Image (cartoon, coloured by chain):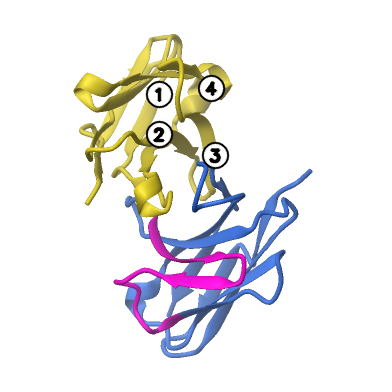
Amino acid sequence: AQSVTQPDIHITVSEGASLELRCNYSYGATPYLFWYVQSPGQGLQLLLKYFSGDTLVQGIKGFEAEFKRSQSSFNLRKPSVHWSDAAEYFCAVAFKAAGNKLTFGGGTRVLVKP
Amino acid sequence: DAMVIQNPRYQVTQFGKPVTLSCSQTLNHNVMYWYQQKSSQAPKLLFHYYDKDFNNEADTPDNFQSRRPNTSFCFLDIRSPGLGDAAMYLCATSRDSSGNPYEQYFGPGTRLTVT
């Protein structure tokens, strides 16, 4: 069965600093990859997705992610964080063979220091 | 704006008292999902509808049921809520789940408290 790992449970970053969130998956087939953000008490908002093509994808709110097949990774980055980026971030994968159902990682909570 | 709407946003029910959560969508998506999300955890898929076809996850308790009377609406029924069912319940939709990949659009969630 596929699995998704987000190694960092919490990350604290200063406002204006860069941010990188790690995501690794395990499965043999080519995945469809997603990053979602969840503010407290809210639903999930899609930041970006990768289905095929250019492995560096741009998303909303200044985020980007890079798919590295050799490392089974899809890390999320932002060059300069804003206080409003404080939230929980979930990486998710889907596989056609599994009916395109999402499997989520455990999430990374990002705290932004002034 | 096209969207996924969940009502109510907050629901308090008593132990063992049936409760229904509602989801509606204006996206005209053919797939609707229900997730359970407990505090500080990832969402867990309970079941989904592909059009009118119901697909239950293997580990979803029988206490959880769902109805989809039409394309726009989907309900989550908890027949006898226990304290362990207190969670955020998220509804999501997507255009297709069997062929091409599509992203899922999530509603704001309903936070269920069981007293």
Compared with B8, B81 (above or below) is below
Residue receiving disc 4: A59
Residue B35 location, quadrant: bottom left
Residue under numbered circle 3: A45
Calculate the distance from the C-alpha at mark 2 to the C-alpha at mark 3.
Answer: 14 Å
| Depth order, front residue of A107/A68 | A68
Marks 2 and 1: CB-CB under 8 Å? no
Colour chain B appears in = blue
Chain ID for yellow: A
Mark 2, Cα crowd under 10 Å, few <14 / some 14-19 / many 20+, is many
Mark 1 vs mark 3, CA separation in Å: 19 Å
Left/right placement of residue A80 relative to residue B82 reads: right
Q: What element carries label 4?
A: loop
Magenta region, residue range? B43-64
Residue sitting at the far right: B1
Residue, disc 2: A33
Mark 1 to mark 4 CA distance (whole Å): 20 Å
Q: Distance between the residues labelled 3 and 4?
A: 11 Å
Q: Is tag 2's residue or tag 1's residue first in the polypeptide sequence? A: 2
The image's mark for residue B68 is none
Numbered disc 3: secondary structure:
strand
Q: Are the two marked residues, 1 and 4, in contact with CB atoms closer than 8 angstroms? A: no
Question: In the figure, A93 relative to A75: above or below?
Answer: below
Q: How crowded is mark 1: few (under 14 residues within 10 Å), some or many (20 or more)?
A: some
Q: Mark 3 or 4 closer to N-term?
A: 3
Query: Which residue is tagged 1?
Result: A112
Residue neighbourhood size for the residue with mark 4, other residues' Cα within 10 Å, grouped as few (<14), some (14–19), many (≥20): some
Q: Which of marks 2 and 4 is in front?
A: 2
Q: Which of marks 2 and 4 is nearer the N terminus?
A: 2
The lab-note entry on whether marks 2 and 4 share a chain reads yes
